[in-house]
Image (cartoon, coloured by chain):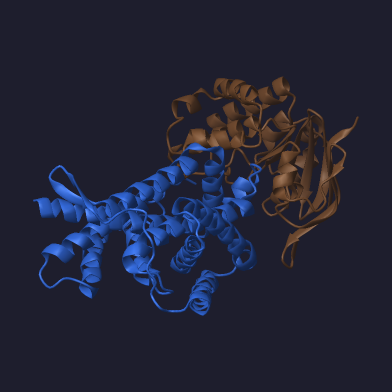
Amino acid sequence: MSNLLALEGVRAGYGQTRALHGVSLSVGEGDIVALLGANGAGKTTTLRAVTGGVRWEGSIHFAGRSLSRMSTESVVRLGIAHVPEGRGIITQLTVDENLRLGAYLRRDRQGVRADYERVFDYFPILRERRELSAGALSGGEQQMLALARALLMRPRLLLLDEPSLGLAPLVVRSLFEIIRTINEKEGVAVLLVEQNARIALELSSHAYVLEVGRVAVEGPSAQLKEEESVRRSYLGY
Amino acid sequence: MQDFLQQVVSGIATGGIFASLALALVLIYNAMGLVNFAQGEMAMLATFTALSLIQRGVDYWIALPVTLVLAFVGGVVIQRVVIRPVERAPVLTLVIVTLGLATLINGLAGFLFGYVPRSFPSPFSVQTVSILGAFASYQDLGVIVVSAIVLVLMYVLLQRTPIGLAMRAAAHQPEASRLLGIRVSWMLALGWGLASAVGAVSGIMAAPALLLEPNMMQTVIIYAFAAAVLGGIESPLGAVLGGLIVGVTVNLAGAYVPGVGGDLQLAVAFAIIIAVLVLKPNGLMGRGSVRRA
């Protein structure tokens, strides 16, 4: 099976501090892959390396293309939507303006219009809130907006950085249901960074556990979920 | 009453000039969190460019758009060459860079064109026309119309086009914008270009009354600063509103408050602005940012 995204021996850091010491992982077409680990393990940095938000060495390929030395703007144009830590909502703009920015790169007007309808089917609340300032949305609604905006980019790969952060359990549940539906219906591959290991392992088919900048454990999610030792030492539940 | 209306119309014309320059300041403030201290000097240099064209026999109405295009290109070049290398520097560095730029352009204009004030042609006659019983000069009305057209065009560009939306996004949240595929660095350059062009309009509109010389915009930019702050520094609409208020206030104070004229006009304008800011610290259109974690 060919990989959509493949990282090999990726090292990256901020200034003098190394955050990644050779991370290798891959995401297949249409897969949901979870990236787990404690705070500071390098999960966010891994995603940032993919979209060029941090300098890195090693190799990263997307759909067979090397992402080496590419700017964030160019990587995104290849079909990667990255919902960053903190969601990346532009709070000074309205909900609708945020959504329109999702379709900023697209030239197919009719496709965009159809996608708007689809996105509003997933997140009806956004239709109601369309004219509101995005800063006035609740945390859950902002996460929905971030997801909706990412979908409007028509990505082949979705990078999600802790979508559950700061949300009530019930909201997290429904959000993850939607992520699953999106993956199944649209065939979008997902690389999911999460602290909430339990729910991430339920959703994903494969998982990697990072520990201080390295992959400590990897395997099918179902298997990781069952292994007592892995659960205890890395996942904390 | 007639006289009052006349003063108001003339104040709106002055206000249009302040508003254009204030809008230029706001555009750049939004893009880099700092006012561009060289904005007035850039406008002055553009005005000299327009004068050079006109003196070479170019029609005013051709010289005007040509100058605006040149000013736009100049603004983009300045951002690329001077500002971009220090983009990530501390704010104080940027302050010094724009102040240096102001001094440089001022000196350059003095060197190229000299310090003797020159008369600048106006396409509008100084004759007056009666509107609702008040007399307004064609000059003032012309300035109002030209400023209004420019401001409306800017509004449409920023609020109603995808590129305007991308510019606003890039100014507010560069990191998040990059992830949406917006070329943030070019959006900032575009912002400098637009600010430079809008500022040029203000210089060209001000020149017939003020006479053109390298220091022409130095008072104007102080009023424009005041207008931008009054409107709430981040709001383009606020800048326009602030410009009009400052223009009308200064004119009325000069006409009706005994002893106010010349330098004191500036003081009166500021007194009113301070009073407004005490009541509304974020300015008239400024909003305290709404944010959630």
Residue A64 lies left or right of residue A91; in this view the side is right
Q: A192 or A158, which is in the foreground?
A: A158
Q: Along the horizontal axis of the image, is A114 left or right of A226? A: left
Residue occupying image coordinates x 35% and y 60%: B229
Q: Nearer the viewer, residue A211 or B62?
A: B62
The outermost residue toward the right is A1
Q: Where residue A108 appears, x then y in whole percent? A: 66, 26
Q: Residue at x 55, y 38 (%)?
A: B162
Q: Is residue A24 visible?
A: yes
Q: Position of residue B4 (x, y in %)?
A: 13, 54
Residue depicted at x 36% and y 62%: B206
Q: Position of residue A24 (x, y in %)?
A: 85, 47
Image quadrant where residue A212 sits:
bottom right
Q: Residue furthest front?
A: B57
| Residue A96 vertical position relative to residue A182 in the rendered view, above or below | below
- Hue used for the chain lettered A: brown
Q: Position of residue A183 (x, y in %)?
A: 71, 26
Q: Which chain is blue?
A: B
Q: Nearer the viewer, residue B50 or A31?
A: B50
Q: In the rendered image, is residue B35 in sight?
A: no
Q: Residue at x 53, y 37 (%)?
A: A98
Q: How many marks?
A: 0
